[in-house]
Image (cartoon, rainbow, N blue to C red):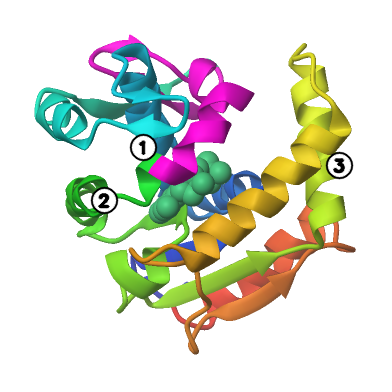
């Protein structure tokens, strides 16, 4: 008889556009876990700020944003048709809007704010407290769940990541320039790593994965093997 496996918290952190969400989603499916995309939460807050004029030309009206956030509800709902979780902002599905370049250009500034992080980290802890989750982000292993049983830190070269992101945006019909995408990737790395609040860093106990030259399947197999050893 197969032994009962433990319901773990699996943290997947790393640089932007490393395919974290693709592998994290797959891992969740294979393990029968819930997948939580914390980047989508920061993106939804950013969209809300842009729509309400709380952020304009990169400048944030922190007071309005803080007040507005207390009336903002971010949720994930399972879409049985696609088998995916989609992001809702005050009851509206915003999955498409939060992935565009405009939100990408503003999200670093919003996610650098302490009060935004505090609110979202609390929500993330609540969502993951019973285990059986794969959570992807930047600070999951370092701040949200420092005691997570399994931690991965994903990276790849900036050029490889920019090319992947560019292809994804073109496929979605966005009119983008490759150079603009690469600049955005590099800029977000810098901002993620140098911000004062919860900067992106690999914790000592996280397993480093550089997937520049790995297929998704190789990566998932490797991650599953690591997870099975902890279950
Ligand atoms: O993973 P992503 O690119 O969708 O994340 C969007 C932004 O949100 C990214 O610039 C970093 C930030 N983020 C964060 O600060 N902390 C997280 N746990 C997740 C994302």
The quadrant of the image that shows the C terminus is bottom left
**Residue corresponding to mark 1:** 41
Q: Earlier in the sequence, mark 1 or mark 3?
A: 1
Q: Earlier in the sequence, mark 2 or mark 3?
A: 2
Mark 1 vs mark 2, CA separation in Å: 9 Å
Q: Earlier in the sequence, mark 1 or mark 2?
A: 1
**Residue corresponding to mark 3:** 163
Please state the extent of the stretch shown in magenta in the rendering: 82-109
* Mark 1 crowd level (few <14, some 14–19, many ≥20, 10 Å Cα): many
Mark 2 vs mark 3, CA separation in Å: 30 Å
**Residue corresponding to mark 2:** 124
Tell whether position 174 is magenta. Answer: no
Instruction: Kindly state the secondary structure of the residue where label 2 is placed.
Output: helix
Instruction: Kindly state the secondary structure of the residue where label 1 is placed.
Output: helix
Query: Is 224 left, or right, of 175 in this rendering?
Result: left
Q: Are marks 1 and 2 in contact (CB under 8 Å)?
A: yes
């Amino acid at each position: 008889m197969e032994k009962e496996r433990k319901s773990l918290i699996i943290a997947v952190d790393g640089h932007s556009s490393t395919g974290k969400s693709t592998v994290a989603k797959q891992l969740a499916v294979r393990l029968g876990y819930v997948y939580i995309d914390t980047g989508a939460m920061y993106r939804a807050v950013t969209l809300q700020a842009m729509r309400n004029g709380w952020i304009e030309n990169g400048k944030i009206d922190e007071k309005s944003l803080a007040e507005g956030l207390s009336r903002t509800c971010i949720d994930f709902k399972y879409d049985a048709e696609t088998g995916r979780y989609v992001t809702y902002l005050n009851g509206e599905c915003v999955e498409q809007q939060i992935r565009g370049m405009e939100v990408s250009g503003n999200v670093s500034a919003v996610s650098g704010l302490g009060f935004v992080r505090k609110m979202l980290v609390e929500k993330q802890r609540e969502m993951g407290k019973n285990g059986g989750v794969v959570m992807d982000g930047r600070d999951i292993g370092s701040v949200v769940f420092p005691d997570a049983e399994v931690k991965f830190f994903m990276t790849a070269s900036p050029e490889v990541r920019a090319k992947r992101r560019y292809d994804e945006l073109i496929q979605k019909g966005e009119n983008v320039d490759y150079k603009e995408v690469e600049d955005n990737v590099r800029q977000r790395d810098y901002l993620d790593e140098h911000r004062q609040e919860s900067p992106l860093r690999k914790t000592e106990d996280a397993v480093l994965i550089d997937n520049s030259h790995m297929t998704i399947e190789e990566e998932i197999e490797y991650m599953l093997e690591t997870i099975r050893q902890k279950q």
